[in-house]
Amino acid sequence: MLTGKKRLLVLVLAVAGMLMTAPGCFAAKRFFAIATGGTGGTYYPLGGVLAQALTTKVKDVIITAQSGNASTANLNLIRSSSIESAFVQNNTAYQAYYGTDQFENNPVKNVRGIASLYPEVIQIVTRKAAGINSISDLKGKSVIPGDRGSGTAVDAENIITAAGMSFKDFGGVDWLSFSGISQRMQDNQADAGFITAGIPTSSVMELVSSTPITILSLDDTLIAKIIKAHPFYAKVVIPAETYANQMMPVTTIAVMAQWVCAAEIDEELIYTLTKELWEPGFHVLRMQDNKPAPAPSGADIMAQAHAKGKDVTLATALNGMAIPLHPGAERYYREKGLIK
């Protein structure tokens, strides 16, 4: 038999349970995290802005951004179910899902795509005086493919291999960072360099301020060959006048920064997050004229907050998506006609 105190406790718990489940009344909050990157990079501020934007638009879900150690570490968090979602580079996501490179014999089979966000563009920068107008013209020239062991160096190798060349075809090879490439080319000690970064890139801006340069365009046949061999690349165009004296657009390829998640996450939640990333909605708490206040899309808020956010568009949401989409994201893109 229940004592008076026990009866009161049961009553309180029952009422609390009803309040937690009743529509519009103190519903239990769900937490959803985005692992980003170091505080000095692009992932961290963009992830923070996105988390804040989605929290204001998705009822009963609190989205947080957590600083991380970039793509490989974030994918390991996905594997161990230590995080719900993360920002990663799409080439690393591809390697993780298929168990290649650093993920050999230890794939991340539970990673799923939500959206491609913005491109990290591969720029093949040459001194105009060197007379380099195509990839084949790099033969016999002094070329810097990037820092040794860097992703940029891998990009350089993938491109020249598709063109039927190797580093041995160059007149000289050195391994330097972006700033080192800029300095060597300013000093006429290198003819060309590969740079993979968001545009405009500060090291290229520095270089063009003192040295006449050309940024090579890749032809469509070569791009198709590269993407067939490495499906995480995406074709992109560097708009004219991105850099001083760059009068024509440049066609090249890019890796994409992507938002990925664990396969185990609820389909309806990922569908809602994907939709709110791309579409305007309503503020879950703020009222206007006795109605929920309108709220811009997550992408629009990212564009307002950060320069790279301007490149986050629905039109490029599936560019370089070389891993399976989460079913919730896939449903949204089918509704929008991006997937037939």
Image (cartoon, rainbow, N blue to C red):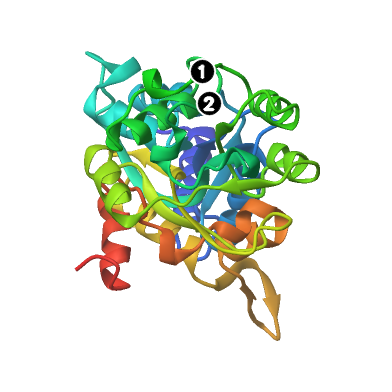
Q: State the residue in front, 31 or 316.
A: 316
Name the outermost residue toward the bottom: 289
Amino acid at dot 1: Val
Quarter holding the C terminus is bottom left
N-terminal-most mark, 1 or 2: 2
Q: Is residue 301 above or below residue 93?
A: below
Q: Residue 81: name its quadrant.
A: top left
Crowd rating for badge 2 (residues with CA inside 10 Å; few <14, some 14–19, many 20+): many
Q: Residue at x 67, y 43 (%)?
A: 201
Q: Position of residue 335 (x, y in %)?
A: 28, 72
Q: Residue 305: name its quadrant.
A: bottom right
Q: What residue did someone put label 1 on? A: 173
Crowd rating for badge 1 (residues with CA inside 10 Å; few <14, some 14–19, many 20+): some
Amino acid at dot 2: Val
* For the residues bearing labels 1 and 2, Cβ distance under 8 angstroms: yes
Q: Secondary structure at mark 2?
A: strand
Q: What residue did someone put label 2 on? A: 143
Quarter holding the N terminus is top left
Q: State the residue in front, 11 or 232.
A: 232
Q: Position of residue 199 (x, y in %)?
A: 62, 49
